[in-house]
Image: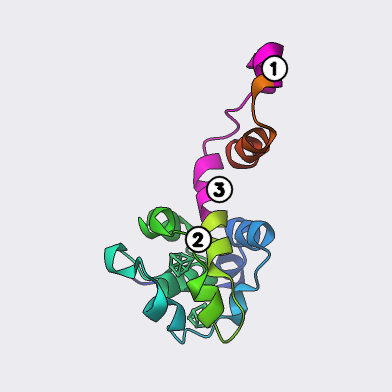
Amino acid sequence: MRIRLSAEVLRNDLVRRVEEISGQDLLACYQCGECSAGCPVAFAMDMLPSQVIRLVQLGQVEEALESETIWLCAACQTCYARCPKGVDLSRIMEALREIALQRDGDYLDIRAIHPEELAEFPQQAFIGGFRKYTW
Ligand code: SF4
Ligand code: SF4
């Protein structure tokens, strides 16, 4: 894949969004590969965890969003435990999943939920739904 690098590409809105949601310093990663070597799900992934963060570092968030890897990540945090730079890749994977789910816009409309149903919903599921399904 050829990537034309520029400040605009490297710091585009989606990169900033990943940083904002995950709270991680993407540039801290120096591609040692420790995360990928220890990931228990890497055998099934179409892209290694270290490759996912590399794509995001290079501003190629759309490519990362196309990967099966972000949905296969089990959030086990083995990568975080192994990372010499303290990068929590599970948070980056979660950020990418959130962006993938939100990209079609808001589709959880609280006004469309009946008040009786609202009272029955588990609060955590409700908050989780808002986090994932609203922009
Ligand atoms: S272990 Fe950390 S520094 Fe190494 S490639 Fe993975 S995220 Fe980057
Ligand atoms: S959190 Fe995800 S990427 Fe990290 S080791 Fe676990 S399954 Fe792999």
Specify whether 125 is left or right of 53: right
Rendered location of residue 28, percent (x, y):
61, 81
Residue bearing the label numbered 1:
111
Query: Which is more foreground, mark 1 or mark 2?
Result: 2
| Quadrant for the N terminus in the image | bottom left
Q: Residue at x 66, y 21 (%)?
A: 120
| Badge 3 element | helix
Above or below — where is 34 with respect to 62? below
Ranked by sequence position, the earlier of labels 3 and 2 is 2
Q: Residues within 10 Å of mark 3 (few under 14, many from 20)?
A: some
Residue bearing the label numbered 3:
98
Rendered image: mark on residue 75: 2
Do we see residue 4 in this rendering? no
Rendered location of residue 86, percent (x, y):
62, 80
| Amino acid under disc 1 | Arg
> Is the CB of mark 1 within 8 Å of ligand 2?
no
Specify whether 62 is left or right of 108: left
Magenta segment, prevailing SS (helix, strand or loop): helix
* Disc 3 and disc 1 in contact, CB within 8 angstroms: no
